[in-house]
Amino acid sequence: MTKIKGIDVSHWNGVIDWKKVAADGVKFVFLKASEGTSYVDKTFKTNATRASAVGIHVGAYHYAKFGSVAEAKAEAQHFLHTVSDVKLTYPLVLDLEENKKKASKAFLTDAAIAFLDAIEKAGYFAMIYAGKHFFETQLDEKRLKPYALWIARYNSFLGRDAGVWQYTETGRVSGISGNVDMNWSYVDYATLIAGKNVSKPPTAVGTVTESKEPTCRIVVNGAKLDAPGIIRNNLSYLPVRAMGNAAGVAVGFCNGKATLGKGTLKTTIVIGETGYAQSREIAEVLGYILEWKQATREVIFTKGKR
């Protein structure tokens, strides 16, 4: 699975030596462009030009303050005006972290969709950013599935599917003084954007709609998972990240292979943007008993080796 190193910065990060940043392996950056309906980050255009000059892909984000559809549309226009003369090769992001106007979940989601739709209609690739807890409690996740997702969670594992994971706010990168937000991108957005005129983001990470193969249900210690597995060549393959989350262990992807906790999965396949591994191999790595119920098409995991 793709795993690309990136950062996000604003004027708070001071003067940046982008040559050193690039030399440190950073491949993309999200720059703060705007906030509300009038604020513009004073370093946005300079950073965009200098980062692009050394081969770093540049995206931009807008810090939202809206609480209604009308306010969201106004903020989107301010964002679009701010980035209009800047070369961008990564998504335009709605940074939604607060709900100070106490909009309901439905109304706040309506507003977010209005903002994202405005970005798409202007010909850009739209993405939404939020903290994991905020996204899962303050917004209607099902309605936002058509949009690319960037999630912040400062932990050893993300615990859900997302296209980009902001995993720390205390990272260190050559060329930047002090701490910096660090990210992993699990989708090569630069190639995706360059390859076609994108008006809609790819299917949300974690779905298997790109596969026509039969699916199966997954049960871990009596709890059914929302994410399905697939059947290929009479073998069941399960989503690695969902299994790691259910088992409470860290998940990693490197050089085409996945890790669950301290174990490495030898056979990993990718469908869409989701990594899968054989159920039997997952059971061995986790130390779980594995059972297949044909009648209900369920793969059942129970903690404890045979």
Image (cartoon, helix red, strand yellow):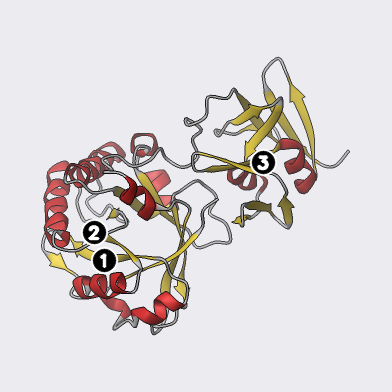
Point out the residue furthest to the top here: 295
Identify the mark nearer the N-term, 3 or 2.
2
Question: Would residue 6 appear left or right of 302 to someone viewing this image?
Answer: left
Residue under label 2: 62
Toward which corner of the image does residue 91 lie, by quadrant?
Answer: bottom left
Q: Classify 126 as above or below 262.
A: above
Residue under label 1: 32
CA separation in Å, label 1 and label 2: 6 Å
Amino acid type, mark 2: His
> Depth check: 87 or 163 in front?
87
Label 1, secondary structure: give it: strand
Q: Are marks 1 and 2 in contact (CB under 8 Å)?
A: yes
Name the residue rendered at 19%, 71% in the picture: 45
CA separation in Å, label 3 and label 2: 37 Å
Amino acid type, mark 1: Lys
Name the residue rendered at 59%, 22% in the picture: 214
Identify the mark nearer the N-term, 1 or 2.
1
Name the residue rendered at 32%, 57% in the picture: 90
Residue under label 3: 277
> Depth check: 61 or 57 in front?
57
Q: Is residue 141 visible?
A: yes
Q: Classify 260 as above or below 121.
A: below
Label 3, secondary structure: give it: strand
Looking at the image, is mark 3 or mark 2 nearer the viewer? Answer: 3
